[in-house]
Image: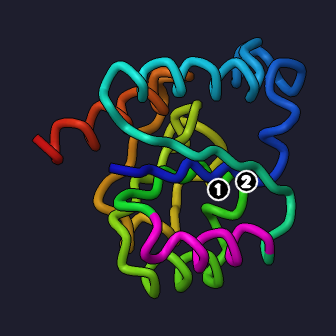
């Protein structure tokens, strides 16, 4: 089984950007933790980050036929990118939306996700564990 982990804008700044909200773990640290856990679970995983909406959409399109699951932290695009929403819906790959912080306990504009209706679920508020919980879900769904 193959999983594609896709990260959106500003996540490349993890570790230094608002550590009081996002913590001090870097995106490279998250990738390393996920690769370790994926290996334990017998899951092949690819990991990508882009600050560009079109690059994220192209990556989602290219995932069709290559991955069984998509794990996506779309960052701010979560709240307004109908293009990313449509891309997820179009490829028909089960997607799990994740966030490090609890988006429902933050600014009002972060409470709404345009991606949630086309995802199998949303995991938020658990820091790095949000990513690992998504991997665990994938492993359990495949067994």
Q: Nearer the viewer, residue 58 or 101?
A: 58
**Which callout, 1 or 2, points at the residue further toward the start of the chain?**
2
Q: Residue at x 32, y 31 (%)?
A: 42
**Answer yes or no: do the residues labelled 1 and 2 have beta carbons within 8 Å?**
yes
Is residue 63 one of those drawn in magenta? yes
Q: Which residues are magenta?
A: 55-66
Along the viewing direction, whichever of 57 and 36 lies nearer the viewer: 36
Q: How is the image coloured?
A: rainbow
* Coordinates of residue 94 in the picture (x, y in percent): 33, 64
**Pointer 1: residues within 10 angstroms few (<14), some, or many (20+)?**
many
In this picture, residue 18 sits left or right of residue 83: right
Left or right: 113 with respect to 37?
A: right
Quadrant of the rendering where the C terminus is positioned: top left
According to the image, label 2 marks what residue?
Answer: 8
Give the residue at x 62% y 52%: 6
Find disc 1 in the rendering and name its residue.
74
Compared across the picture, whether 24 is left or right of 63 comes to right
Front residue (pair 39, 114): 39
Please tell me whether residue 120 is drawn above or below residue 71 in the rendered image: below
Q: Residue furthest left?
A: 143
Query: Marks 1 and 2, how far apart in space?
Result: 4 Å
Q: Secondary structure at mark 2?
A: loop
Find numbered disc 1 in the image and state the secondary structure of the residue it sits on. loop
Percent coordinates x, y for residue 57 in the rendering: 68, 76
Residue 84 - label: none
Identified at 40% across, 53% down, the residue is 96
């Amino acid at each position: 089984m193959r999983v594609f982990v896709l990260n959106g804008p500003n996540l490349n700044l993890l570790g230094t950007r608002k550590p009081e909200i996002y913590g001090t773990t870097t995106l490279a640290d998250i990738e390393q933790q996920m690769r370790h856990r994926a290996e334990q679970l017998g899951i092949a995983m690819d990991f990508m980050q882009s600050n560009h909406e079109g690059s994220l959409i192209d990556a989602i399109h290219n995932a069709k036929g290559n991955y069984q699951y998509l794990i996506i932290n779309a960052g701010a695009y979560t709240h307004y990118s109908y293009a990313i929403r449509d891309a997820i819906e179009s490829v028909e790959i089960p997607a799990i939306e994740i966030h490090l912080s609890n988006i429902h306990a933050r600014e009002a504009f972060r409470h709404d996700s345009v991606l949630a209706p086309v995802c199998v679920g949303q995991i938020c508020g658990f820091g790095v564990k949000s990513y690992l919980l998504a991997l665990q879900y994938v492993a359990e769904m495949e067994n």
